[in-house]
Image: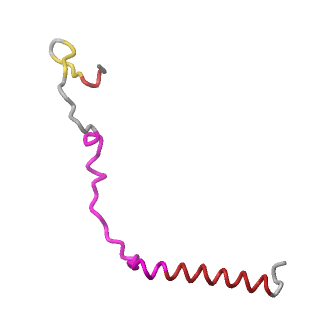
Amino acid sequence: MSLKLYQPGPNGLEPSGDPGRDYRTQLRSRRWNLPRLANTDARPVDALSGVLFFGGLAVLTFVILLVGYGIGFWH
């Protein structure tokens, strides 16, 4: 037993009872429970558009590298 489970009583130290199964709820402060804020700068993008954009960027980079090596720019 640790002293965290005891509170001082009239006759010295007495058990305070079960602290509960989830002690983490006692560690949270009310000031950290803020409401969710909307991000007005972000616009949601669907997954297909994201994949097409980054896939196209990868293909374009690969083509630039192939052309650069093909014409002898990078030797």
Q: Is residue 32 magenta?
A: yes
Q: Residue at x 45, y 82 (%)?
A: 49
**8 or 16: nearer the eye?**
16
* Rendering quarter of residue 26: top left
**33 or 67: nearer the eye?**
67
**31 or 55: nearer the eye?**
55
Left or right of 4 in this view: 52:
right
Q: Residue at x 23, y 36 (%)?
A: 21
Q: Is residue 71 above or below residue 51?
A: below
Left or right of 8 in this view: 48:
right
Q: Is residue 42 magenta?
A: yes
In the rendering, at what x and y percent does residue 62 appear? 66, 80
In the rendering, at what x and y percent does residue 50 appear? 47, 79
Q: Is residue 23 above or below residue 48?
A: above
Quadrant for the N terminus, please.
top left
Highlighted range, magenta: 24-51
In the rendering, at what x and y percent does residue 36 appear? 29, 64
Q: Residue at x 19, y 20 (%)?
A: 15
* Rendering quarter of residue 7: top left
* Rendering quarter of residue 34: bottom left
Q: Residue furthest left?
A: 10
Quadrant for the C terminus, please.
bottom right
Q: Residue at x 31, y 67 (%)?
A: 37
Q: Is residue 15 above or below residue 49?
A: above
Left or right of 20 in this view: 55:
right
